[in-house]
Structures are given as structure tokens and as C-alpha cells.
Amino acid sequence: MDYIFASAIQKTALLFILISYDIACQWFVNLFKRMTAHWPPELHLPASTTFIPAIPKLHEPMHVAANHQVYSLNYIRGVGLSDLECPERVWAGHNAIGNSTKTQGPGSRHDILDDQFNFWNWQKYNTMGTTLMRKYRNALAERNIQGEAHRGLTSSLSAELVTKWEAACVDWENDGFSTTTKNPYQSKYSGWWLSVWHLI
């Protein structure tokens, strides 16, 4: 994984890179130690780039660990409603191809798989304009709804409490990935059922 990742971003000049990986919480922790100890110099990551590890939304709830919100796409600034599960969606459409090509020789099987994936990509690129526009319009509408809900909630609370909560959230976001700031999203209850039980 290290080699694939380093090769993919080699010679990029990006300021921020969001890394979506099912086990980012384990893989990313010692990434820079492994880089300095074992990687060839030409694959070293640029020092000017900020790396932000994240776990896709389908996989993240299964990582039951304290202070795990740092990997949650719900709390990473600029991510919006992205779930980063797109590679997983492609598999379902290609499952039938496995059965229809398993009796073929390796060369013809690879050719058919390449054709199928190329056709999938061609369809994706042809519809990307309308798909992105639809998602953009939905995002604007949802932003307005959430903005109104936030204004309604904050107007029902004391201004001092709202300022304190907002400051805690901003401090945590600004602290970056390996945050030492107290996590305002960490609950002492470790499951929705416990939170509901506590409210009863």
C-alpha cells in the first residue's frame, strides 16, 4: 500500500490530500516513520503537503475506538456529504462478469475485463456533467435547510453557550489530524442506543 500511495502522488504540488482508506486509522499512524526508514528517496512525500486520513462512511462505524472521530468524514472540514465509497459501488455491476469469464484463458479474460471497465468509465465521463450538476443543486438545497436548522437551534440557546461550543469545534478542526485539543464530538456513551437510553 505504501508504494502504491507514494507512486500515485509522486511529484504532485497539492497543499492538501485527503486519504480515504478502510484502515486509515492503522495504516496512516506510522506512515512517515516507514517512509524515512524504508522508502527510496524519490518516493518521499512532499513536506509542504498536509495529509488528512479518513475512513469511508460505510466502514467507519465498525471501527469502535475512542477518539475515532478524527477519521470521520462527518467532521473533516470541506468534505461535505462525501462518503468516499465509490470504488465499492463499481464491484456490484461487475460481479456477473466474473462468472462469464472464469472459463476463459488469462489473455482473453483480461481483454474482456479491460473492455468492460473502459465502457464503465466512458459512461461515467459522458454523464458526469449532469450527475455533478444534480448533486450540486441538491447540495445547495440541503445547505440552505441545514443553515436554517442551525440558526433555529442556536437562537433557542444562550449566546454564551453557542460561542463556547463553536470555539471548541473550531479549535478542534484547526488543530489538524493528530489533534491534542479536546474532541467536542467525543461522547462518553459509545453507541446510539446508549445515548437514547440515557435520554429516557
Image (cartoon, grey):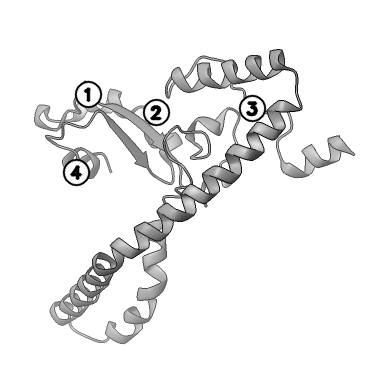
Where does the image place residue 46, in percent across and percent down from the top left? 19, 26
Q: Is residue 2 among the parts visible in the rendering?
A: yes
Where disc 3 sits, the SS reads loop
Whichever of callouts 3 and 2 sits on the residue coming sooner in the sequence is: 2
Of tags 3 and 2, the one toward the viewer is 3
Q: Is residue 13 left or right of residue 32?
A: left
Amino acid type shown at disc 4: Ala
Whichever of callouts 4 and 2 sits on the residue coming sooner in the sequence is: 4
| Label 2 sits on residue | 29
User: How far apart are the two marked residues, 3 and 1, measured between alpha carbons?
Assistant: 34 Å
Other-residue count near label 1 (Cα within 10 Å), few / some / many at <14 / 14–19 / ≥20: few
Where does the image place residue 108, in percent across and percent down from the top left? 15, 82
**Labels 4 and 1 touching (C-beta < 8 A):** no
User: How far apart are the two marked residues, 3 and 4, measured between alpha carbons?
Assistant: 34 Å
Instruction: Judge whether 172 appears above or below 9 on screen.
Output: above
| Label 3 sits on residue | 186
State the residue in front, 3 or 129: 129
Query: What's the residue at 56%, 22% (across, down)?
Result: 169
Where does the image place residue 56, in percent across and percent down from the top left? 46, 47
| Label 1 sits on residue | 37
Amino acid type shown at disc 1: Ala
Amino acid type shown at disc 2: Val
Q: Is residue 85 among the parts visible in the rendering?
A: no
| Label 4 sits on residue | 8
